[in-house]
Amino acid sequence: MTERLTIAIQKSGRLSKESLALLNACGVKFSINEARLIAHSTSHPIDLLRVRDDDIPGLVMDGVVDLGLVGENVLEEVRLEREAVGDAAEYKPLRPLEFGGCRLSIAVPRETPFEKLSDLNGKRIASTYPYLLQRYLKDNGVSAKNVNLTGSVEVAPRAGLADAICDLVSTGATLEANGLVEKEVIFRSQAQLIQSNEPLSPEKQAMIDQLLPRIDGVQLAKESKYIMLHAPKAALDEVIALLPGAETPTVLPLSHTDEQVAVHMVSTEKLFWETMEDLKAIGCSSILVLPIEKMMG
Ligand SMILES: Nc1ncnc2c1ncn2[C@@H]1O[C@H](COP(=O)(O)OP(=O)(O)OP(=O)(O)O)[C@@H](O)[C@H]1O
Ligand SMILES: O=P(O)(O)OC[C@H]1O[C@H](OP(=O)(O)OP(=O)(O)O)[C@H](O)[C@@H]1O
Ligand SMILES: [Mg+2]
């Protein structure tokens, strides 16, 4: 019987769509039944375990699943907690993933005077991340009390449950809507692909070895663009200097003229409108910027 690789992803939340989209872009296809915990891949001997994000690090650390996609905030919180109680807390980090970017910050009500972190001495801080919070406070010589909540942390000060909060922030809209001001970033996070420390069968290892370059290819392609333009031959050096990451452009002749050439290149950097305007100003035309779907070196 073929061994099946198991991957834990968040069932429903901020990471779900992009976790599935990444696997899909790597050619690992699933047909998801929303109600089901397990989804079998229709293209590979791979099973998805769809769970709450809080459970993903533990499932990987206990070797229940082979891989997990989870936010570094949850990963580090669970690792600290398991370390504290003596449970297995090891895993292999495989790849940072380019989604789920956020920060864990301390915030206080707008009307609370706050100048420095030590103003929190003796205060109550509501959070879902007690271990990350206490580690940060301890590292900075501050002693405050945790008020552990599993949700709606931002309403804790208004409800009289806490003096400050420590919660995830991305745009800051949630803080703003609750009359809170961000004061201190304690942890920066993005999603990460992790592997269990348990030894894997050669078949499972082979699947991971195939998956990783595909993930790299998908992530690199996302940032990259294929650029095509017509440039005056005389301005070629200037054109190349303007284009980000244009070390090895392809330069092709054009059928109707000797004065101009076609330049094709892959840029791994963002191309701004300003650069396109500068290119036009030195005589370039037909400037096209195309997305790339996949890349392999
Ligand atoms: N505003 C945000 N912007 C970007 N990423 C975020 C944001 N909020 C959270 N995340 C990331 O997405 C992860 C999941 O967030 P979400 O709010 O869906 O979790 P949850 O409510 O704990 O879900 P679950 O029901 O799975 O426990 C977070 O742990 C964090 O890594
Ligand atoms: O700075 P912002 O862009 O406002 O994002 C921050 C909010 O996003 C997350 O919650 P989410 O919206 O995922 O809902 P949840 O708390 O119900 O999980 C997080 O817990 C914050 O409340
Ligand atoms: Mg959660």
Image (cartoon, grey):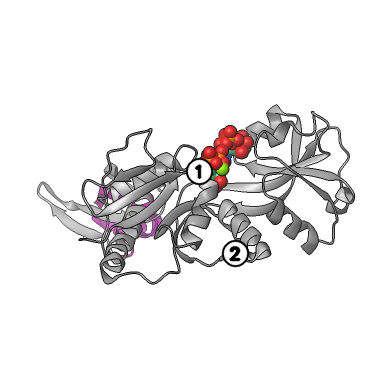
**Label 2 vs 1, first from the N-terminus:** 1
Identify the image quadrant of the C terminus.
bottom left
User: Mark 1: is the Cβ under 8 angstroms from ligand 1?
Assistant: yes
Pick the front one: 277 or 163: 163
The residue furthest left is 255
Residue that numbered label 1 is attached to = 52
Q: Is residue 66 visible?
A: yes
Q: Give the alpha-carbon distance from disc 2 to disc 1, as whole Å.
A: 20 Å
Residue 89: x and y in percent read 56, 65
Residue 107, percent from left and from top: 75, 41
Mark 2 surroundings: few (<14), some (14-19) or many (≥20) residues within 10 A: some
Tell me the residue at 64%/65% (across/down): 83
Magenta segment: 223-247
> Which residue sits at x=48%, y=56%?
59
In the image, residue 98 lies in the stretch drawn in magenta = no
The reply, left or right, for residue 40 in relation to residue 180 is: left
- The residue under label 2 is 87
- Identified by mark 2, the residue type is Asp
Q: How many marks?
A: 2
